[in-house]
């Protein structure tokens, strides 16, 4: 390994890797750039070797201990506990990692003294933060995992940024300014894709139809009565009505997406939508583009669209105990919209619902950030970029 001075920082060259606890060696190269960017220190690394590379990490020592806030969450004192956070959706370590809405972590070492760690992503990818406490500070692992559908012997890590600030806003603002720019997020006031009626919405009313077990919370008749009450409290034009489980057993019936007979069937659903529209409400029925029940007979129509995790194990929706037997169910397969069979099925169900019931103000298609880990034929993100206009 060699280190060279460079403008505003250092350039690290590494040749060869070790594995098996330093007992074995493997050929390869590593290039890392460590730079000072104003008040920040930033690091970016690229590695190559003779086999596919899944992830790359940087280790930072001497990080001050204190209260911790992940992605704008409340500060808490972890005391001597080790910490693991992951973005998105636990960074794939759902059962052990704390979730993050964005890959940024802030430590309050003392009053008005903040230390922050940030991953500057340009695309949604797995990012993990592991904090190991020591007497003089944390040893932090910053881990980047590549998209699972692109196997390559080369990996280019993101820019990792660390720094200090004297206010919480100063600690968080640089990260979210990067997010705004990298993902081209427009200001709410200037968004051209927001219809005028939606700018008047100030309240979302969620009317959940049926639990996974079949327990009915709100059938269509009860939902309409609820909206009649809501209309006496607030102008309906200012309300968006969100309808999860209008299709029956929540997540079990995915992806049939037809009005459930026990809730009132097709006529009951039509009466709800027409009655609500007559009062001025806007509706948003829920469709789950993320999962499908493998035990349903319909599943054979799109069974080729399931996904695997980056290590090859099946990617199932297996983190919820729906039936209260103290064991998470695993019958839901995580699906990939990049595969035509699943995309066509879901598009057809959405189109039929819009056509039959005029529930077309908004369609909620539930998306999970864990798709970046899916080993699939196509990237779901690429499909969104190319195909979303056809769904509009």
Image: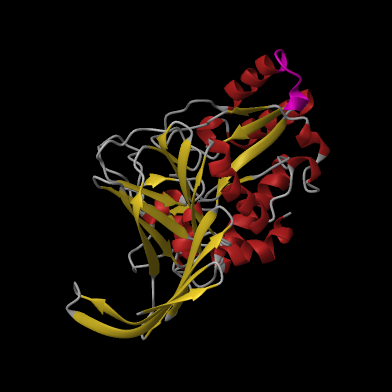
Answer above or below: position of 28 versus 189: below
Above or below 250: residue 130: below
- Name of the residue lying farthest toward the left: 23
Residue 282 in view of the camera = yes
| Left or right of 297 on screen, residue 225 | right
For the N terminus, give its image quadrant.
Answer: bottom left
Count of all numbered marks drawn on residues in the image:
0
Question: x%, y% of residue 179?
Answer: 61, 52
**Lateral position of residue 122 relative to residue 100, left or right:** right
Residue lying at 73% horizontally and 60% vertically, measured from the top left: 390
- Name above or below for residue 96 compared with residue 153: above
| In-front residue for pair 128/218 | 128
- The colour scheme applied to this rendered structure is secondary structure
Q: Is 237 within the magenta?
A: yes
The boundaries of the magenta stretch are 231-238
User: At which x and y percent is residue 326?
Assistant: 25, 37
Q: Residue at position x 20%, y 75% from top?
A: 22
Asked whether residue 142 is drawn in magenta, I would say: no
Q: Nearer the viewer, residue 323 or 162?
A: 162
Visible residue check, residue 244? no
The C terminus, quarter of image: bottom right
Position of residue 25 relative to residue 191, above or below, is: below
Relative depth, front residue between 253 and 315: 315
Q: Residue at x 31, y 49 (%)?
A: 138
Which residue is depicted at the point 79% across and 40% down? Answer: 189
Question: Residue 382 at what x, y percent from top left?
Answer: 61, 67
Examine the image and state in which quarter residue 264 appears: top right
**Horizontal and vertical percent position of residue 316:** 38, 55
């Amino acid at each position: 390994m060699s280190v060279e001075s460079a403008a505003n920082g250092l350039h690290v060259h590494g040749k060869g890797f070790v594995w098996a606890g330093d007992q074995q060696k493997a050929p390869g190269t590593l290039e890392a750039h460590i730079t000072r960017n104003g008040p920040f220190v930033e690091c970016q690394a690229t590695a190559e070797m003779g086999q596919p590379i899944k992830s790359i990490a940087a280790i930072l020592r001497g990080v001050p201990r204190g209260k911790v806030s992940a992605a704008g969450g409340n500060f808490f004192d972890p005391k001597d506990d080790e910490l693991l956070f992951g973005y998105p959706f636990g960074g794939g370590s759902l059962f052990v990692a704390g979730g993050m809405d964005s890959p940024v972590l802030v430590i309050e070492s003392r009053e008005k003294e903040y230390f922050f760690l940030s991953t500057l992503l340009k695309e949604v990818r797995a990012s993990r933060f592991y904090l190991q406490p020591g007497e003089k500070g944390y040893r932090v692992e910053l881990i980047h995992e590549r998209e699972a559908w692109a196997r390559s012997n080369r990996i280019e890590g993101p820019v990792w940024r660390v720094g200090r600030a004297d206010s919480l806003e100063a600690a968080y603002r640089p990260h979210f300014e990067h997010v705004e720019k990298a993902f081209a997020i427009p200001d709410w006031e200037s968004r051209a894709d927001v219809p005028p009626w939606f700018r008047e919405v100030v309240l979302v009313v969620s009317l959940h139809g049926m639990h996974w077990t079949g327990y009915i919370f709100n059938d269509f008749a009860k939902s309409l009565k609820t909206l009649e009450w809501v209309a006496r409290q607030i102008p309906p034009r200012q309300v968006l009505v969100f309808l999860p489980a209008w299709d029956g057993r929540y997540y079990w019936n995915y992806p049939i997406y037809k009005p459930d007979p026990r809730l009132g069937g097709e006529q009951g659903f039509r009466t709800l939508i027409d009655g609500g529209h007559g009062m001025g409400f806007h509706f948003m029925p829920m469709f789950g583009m993320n999962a499908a029940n493998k035990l349903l007979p319909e599943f054979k129509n799109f069974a080729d669209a399931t996904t695997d995790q980056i290590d090859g194990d099946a990617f199932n929706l297996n983190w919820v105990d729906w039936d209260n037997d103290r064991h998470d169910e695993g019958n839901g397969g995580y699906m990939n919209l990049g595969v035509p069979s699943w995309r066509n099925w879901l598009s057809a169900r959405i189109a039929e619902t819009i056509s039959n019931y005029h529930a077309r103000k908004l369609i909620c298609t539930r998306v999970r950030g864990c798709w970046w880990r899916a080993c699939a034929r196509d990237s779901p993100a690429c499909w969104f970029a190319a195909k979303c206009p056809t769904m509009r």
